[in-house]
Each structure stands twice: as C-alpha cells, then as structure tokens.
Amino acid sequence: MELLRFFPLVVLVLILGALAYTLLVRQEIVPEGFATLLYRKGRFVRVLTPGAHRMWRPGHTTQQVDMRERSVTVPGQEVLSQEQVGLKVSVAARFAVAAPELALHRVQNYLEALYLAVQLALREEVARHPLEELVAGRVDLGQRMRERVAEQARAFGLSVEAVEVKDVMLPADLRRAFAEALKARKESQARLEKARGESAALRHLSNAARMVDQNPSLLNLRMLQTLEGASTTSGHTFVLGVGPELTPLARRPPAGGTPVPPTETDEPEPA
C-alpha cells in the first residue's frame, strides 16, 4: 500500500525529468558528406562528424558545412599574354572543404576567396608565356595554376583537386592569322616531303644506272620482267625495239665483222 501511495509521485517525477531532458538536451544528426561545427556561447568547440550527437541546448549552436567535392568556374577572363596580346580564358577549379573550421573562420566567404585566387593565378601564368605556346597547348596552364592556387587555398581550409582550362578565345584577326600561319606551315612541310622523295628517287636511279653500267646483263633481266608483266594483259600487241647490243636474241657479229640481222624466227611474236 505504501508503494501505491508514492506511485503517482514517481510518475510525475519521470514526466518532469523527460520534459526537462527534452528542453535541455537536443540531438544533432550530421548526414554523410557534411560536417557540423559546434559552438558554445559563440566560441568554437569541435567538429561533429557524420552521425547522431547529443548536446545541451542552452548556449550551444551549430553550423553545417558541405564537405563534398564541388567546382567553381571563372568564365571569360580578359588576360594579356607575354606579348601584351589580349585573349579570353575560362577556367574551372574542382575543390573540397578539407578543414571546415578554417573555411568558416579564416575568410568571410571561402568560395569568393577561391574565385579570386584562381583569377590572379590565371593572369600571372598567362602573362609569363607567349601567345603561340598558349594556343598550341604546349604550356600546361591547369597544372601550374593548381600548384599556385592549392597553396593559397590550403590556408583557408580548402583542398584544390584540379584546375582545368576550359576555353581560350582569340580575337577574330588573330584567329585568321593563326589559320594562315598553320596553312603555310602545312604547305611548307608538304613541299619538303616532296623534295625528299624526289631526292631519294634520284639516288635510287643513280644507283641503278651505276649497277647497269657495271653489269649490262641486268638490263636484259629488267626487259624480261617488263615482258612478263605485260603478258598478263590480253588483246594488245607489244613491239619492242632494242639494239643488238642489249638483247641476246640478236646474232652477235664475229670479231671484226658487221652485225648480222635477226632472222624471221627471231622477230617477236604478238602477245
């Protein structure tokens, strides 16, 4: 009976305790890919990782930060090359927040700070190289800019994964000049290749003439190869006129005599 008399009081205490717990303690759930900064009376306490966290309500506040990889685009910046030629370059940078406490506490807006760092790096890198190297792609602007921007962004808690040049836009007159220069270069290369081919052909002909001069029977073999190739074509008659000194079909004159003309049987037959 004594226990039953105190039962309503126990229930009341439990209800009041649950109500006090609800009012004083709250649960903070941090989703995957985010981080939450915990503050007590305006002072930073710690970073809450993904999961469920309980904290006192009075005097505690939180701020969530996106830790996923993102990109920022710097479109169409007017920059000058080493020759003081103006061109437009657009750049994209991929980054992620590595230290959320630095990203929120060191700068007012880390996106604007990164944007400015990419702009300045683009101007400095383009100004160090001639226009021809930039247009031809012989300079890896993205890698050079990433090295420069990553060091600055690390100071305010960002990790720069890559910086890529999206487009290089030239004025119309420069585009025409580059097109004409490229055409002239291609034509020059074609003429050079043609001259090399002609020189090689002349060398081969010179070597062949030297071999025939040293061994005249090679000319007879060449004639037989020509006849063999021509015999595959039907319906044509081939007449070969060769001197007696080039063909074994002619009768050789005796020593000190006159050449003997070939007989009727020695004349070539139609193919």
Image (tube, rainbow, N blue to C red):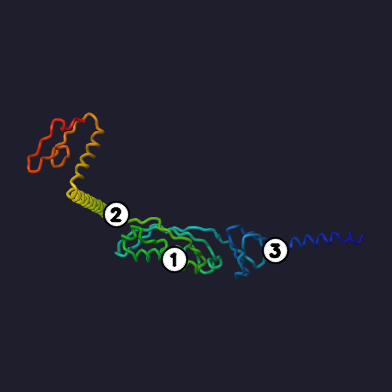
Of tags 1 and 3, the one toward the viewer is 1
Which is more toward the observer, 137 or 67?
A: 137
Residue at (44, 66) in percent of width and height: 147
Of tags 2 and 3, the one toward the viewer is 2
Indicate which disc, 2 or 3, sits on the residue closer to the N terminus. 3
Q: Circles 2 and 1: CB distance less than 8 Å?
A: no
Q: Which residue is under mark 2? A: 175
Residue 264 coordinates in the image, percent (x, y)? 14, 30
Disc 1 crowd, CA 10 A, few/some/many (<14, 14-19, 20+):
some
Q: Which mark is residue 63?
A: none
Q: Which residue is under mark 3? A: 25
* Mark 1 secondary-structure assignment: helix
Q: Residue type at mark 3? A: Val
176 over 59 or under it: above or below: above
Label 2, label 1: how many angstroms apart (C-alpha)?
Answer: 30 Å
Relative to 195, 118 lies left or right: right
Q: Which residue is under mark 1? A: 147
Disc 3 crowd, CA 10 A, few/some/many (<14, 14-19, 20+):
some
* Mark 3 secondary-structure assignment: strand
Residue 71 coordinates in the image, percent (x, y)? 48, 58
